[in-house]
Image (tube, rainbow, N blue to C red):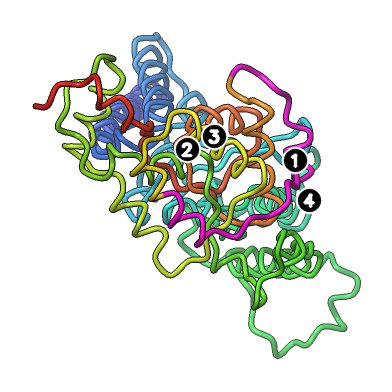
Amino acid sequence: MAEKIESSDAEIRELIHNRIKEGYQLQSCLKHYSSVSGAGKLERRITAEIKFLEKLLKSGNPKREHVSSSNLQSLAAIVNLLSRCNEPVALLRSFPIGDSERIVVDIVSNGGSTWNKVIARNPEALLQITFNKCYGQKSIVDQAGEYLKAASRNLHLFQRVIVEGERQHIDEPVCIDDTEDTESDEEDVSTPPMDATQRLSLQFDAIEKSEEDRRDVRLSINDACLVAPDIPLIAEDCVFLDLTAIVTYVSNITNGGTNFIFDKPIYNQQAEWERLQPVKPKLEQLFTGKILLTCQTAMREFEDLINVIGGPRERQRWDVLRKQIIVTKDILSPRFEDLPLSASVKERSRVIFGTADALQVVIITANTSFVRSAAEQGVNIAAFLHEARVLTEMKEKTACPL
């Protein structure tokens, strides 16, 4: 008996050693994804599990159930899935379901259009939860419903994200036992057994279909325009220009005026950035083939700005650009009406971004502080971000040529 206990203890210690080794391998793999948002959070969780296992190894009597309580296997499943994902942008990202509830998505991939969730349960537990036989735990249907509800509230570029679930450690099909179901005799016995993975997939599909049936009808852009367009406008064919995008597009600094030493550091910094990475070609690429929109507030604010500090060539560029822009009324979407004002959330920006959101048109902006602040409050904005530039033509009069 003593030899058996000693052997069991040795096996457990070997298992712990292997898990610790796996943990360090996971950390090494994560180094390739250091630029992905949330990678540091995932690495810290792996480090915590390694420390737990190392402490367990030093204890006098490690138990197998102690090893089983480690979350390292679940974290390993996330890292393994990450290596197969295309264009991952975030790890362990939290999204709101309602006013207070949130869900955590393991991986946000495909540039933001896909949510990947690891389902870390053994076959028996997965089967039990699928049929609501584990009291106190949410069924697969409930979990899928939460994710699809969150997906409908957190759109990516105004499109619903794809929710994908990946099972962990379910290598063999788990046949469904219907002996406890009083109605099982009425089922078609010719239907082959369905494994738990197939059942999970069907549940996701069914919920997604019912959610799509309840999708809200988007606001008509034509109804919002101050002057009725000649053709019906579709959101996918449009981009919305923030005040910062208009300033950047017509500025002298983005149109060849970088070879100056200005009397203020901010202008010199932007001139240097522009020489290294011009912004206007990126804006022109975003504008190509699109209908340009902006709202009354953005139009009025820019007109006031350029009339005060704009130079003659900047005004000429504005005259050309203005003829290409369709102006809409100021319309705040409900979620922007509820967005509280702060140092980063000004009323002017809330109106501009809220109008783009109401029309469900992607906004082009350099106002990263507003986008970030809104996201921290659960309002994710569909935006193309670019570097900010200022109107500089009048400043060239007091600048020295390079």
Type of amino acid at the residue the image marks with label 4: Lys
Location of mark 4 (residue): 133
In the image, the segment drawn in magenta is 318-343
Q: Is residue 87 visible?
A: yes
C-beta proximity under 8 Å, tags 2 and 4: no
Residue 105 lies, with reference to residue 31, above or below; the image says below
Type of amino acid at the residue the image marks with label 2: Thr
Q: Quadrant of residue 373?
A: top right
Residue 178: within the magenta?
A: no
Quarter of the image with the C terminus in it: top left
Type of amino acid at the residue the image marks with label 1: Arg
Location of mark 2 (residue): 244
Location of mark 3 (residue): 371
Mark 4 and mark 1: Cα distance apart in space: 38 Å
How busy is the neighbourhood of tag 1: few (under 14 within 10 Å), some, or many (20 plus)?
Answer: few
Mark 4 and mark 3: Cα distance apart in space: 44 Å
Q: Please state which of the two labelled residues, at mark 4 or mark 1, is closer to the viewer.
A: 1
Residue 387 x %, y %: 36, 36
Q: Classify mark 4: helix, strand or loop.
A: loop
Say whether residue 275 is left or right of residue 84.
left
